[in-house]
Image: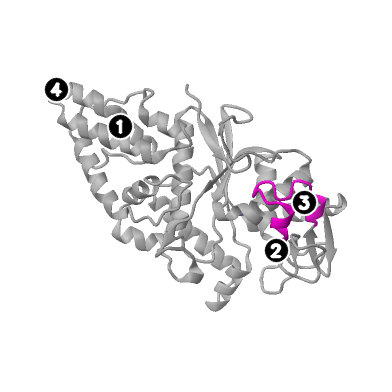
Amino acid sequence: MKKLVLYDTMSRRKEVFRPRNPPAVSMFVCGPTVQSELHLGHARTYIFFDALARYLRHRGYDVFYLMNITDVDERISQAAAGRGEDPLKYASRMASLMMRDLESLNIRSISRFEPVSRHVDEAIRQVKILLEKGFAYEAAGWVYFDTTKFKRWGRLSHQSKKDLSLRPLELSPRKRSLNDFALWRPEVLIDGLWPSPWGVGSPGWHIQDTAVTIPILGAQYDIHGGAYELVYPHHEAEIAEAESVTGARPLVRHWVHTNLVKSEGLKMSKSLGNVVTVREALRRFTPDEIRLASLSIHYRRETDLSGLASARRRLRGMKNAARRFKDRAASVALPLTPFERALNDDFDTPNALAWAEETLRSAAKEADRDKAAAVAAPAIEGMKILGVDLLEGA
Ligand SMILES: [Zn+2]
């Protein structure tokens, strides 16, 4: 089988995909903070990782795909307070809506969802270890990670000491240095506060991820995914915490990040008010159209998803062509076609889709039905691997 290469944010190169214990593959993707509904920015990221997991399974890997759900955050408490709801209840209601949206988008590859609120004990255990080992310090009910103690701080985001000095985190007079970040917060903003050796409070955002991954995936795993904006400080902080807690490194073999979805030239975000929610999008487009538009742009490029309108036309063309072979579309073992070659090269879905489209077009022109069906089969099969069943409802 041909090698699969994926661009690695850490090495800044395309690296041959080599899981630690093949055929097992452990994959973790940062789930959303459930203070509001999923938007198209989330959809792009989660559709990409869904397609990647499906492809890895097609290649024979036994993929365990874990996603956390951030249900502990002061933005959630604020949103809940605005509605007079209990924060954890509000978060669990929003998490159900999120699962519904993921399911509507045909994102079905995730093996396990873990709400962070169930892992606070583990977060406390890790903070204790970091304090014992001297990687953390306590200050008035807060616990901070001391980034000056972690030699590899800044490596994932490729920042020099000077770069880092220009990007201070969480400004506070309690901190020893600018990049230190909170492991434990005493804030009163969040209800459902947890008791800890440092007083009642809640775990900081970054340690919420390692609290979920270390017990479930272990000290090291294969793929960590998420949106590009999470590289610094979030993923940088996860490396510092996990590698300091366990002593094992690297935490992750392959760091995979998706680029931004912009709307009207700006990053889609709640604060900018330019968000298109998944639910709104699904009123106008089908899940397959949203998937096709998302995968039409390479995952490392920015997109405004302006391809949504043309996705409808493209998909219709592909489905019409595929339907002609409905009765003949025997299940084929996908030969090494340009489709698979494209995916093996840093998951180049735009090229894979273009090949499938072109192949179906030429199959449709072929006069001999058997020959045409044989030409079309790998394209139909390939699209199915990416999560688009061209024959569904045919
Ligand atoms: Zn995360």
Query: Which of 263/241 is in front?
Result: 263
Residue 126 numbered tag? 3
Label 4 packing within 10 angstroms: few (<14), some (14-19), many (20+): few
Determine whether the residue tagged by mark 2 lies in a helix, strand or loop: loop
Residue 228: percent from the left, percent from the top?
A: 55, 52
Span colored in magenta: 146-166
Q: Nearer the viewer, mark 2 or mark 1?
A: 2
Looking at marks 4 and 2 on the same chain, the residue that comes earlier in the sequence is marked by 2
* Amino acid type, label 3: Gln
* Quarter of the view holding residue 365: top left
Classify 170 as above or below 294.
below
Q: Residue at x 31, y 50 (%)?
A: 289
Residue 27: percent from the left, percent from the top?
A: 57, 40
Assess whether residue 290 is covered by the magenta stretch: no
Residue 169 numbered tag? 2
Residue to which mark 4 is pinned:
368
Residue to which mark 1 is pinned:
379
Q: Residue at x 84, y 54 (%)?
A: 131
Classify 132 as above or below 333.
below
* Amino acid type, label 4: Asp
Q: Residue at x 34, y 38 (%)?
A: 353
Q: Nearer the viewer, mark 3 or mark 1?
A: 1
* Amino acid type, label 1: Ala
Query: Image check: 115 left or right of 274?
Result: right
Q: Nearer the viewer, mark 3 or mark 2?
A: 2
* Quarter of the view holding residue 274: bottom left
Looking at marks 3 and 2 on the same chain, the residue that comes earlier in the sequence is marked by 3
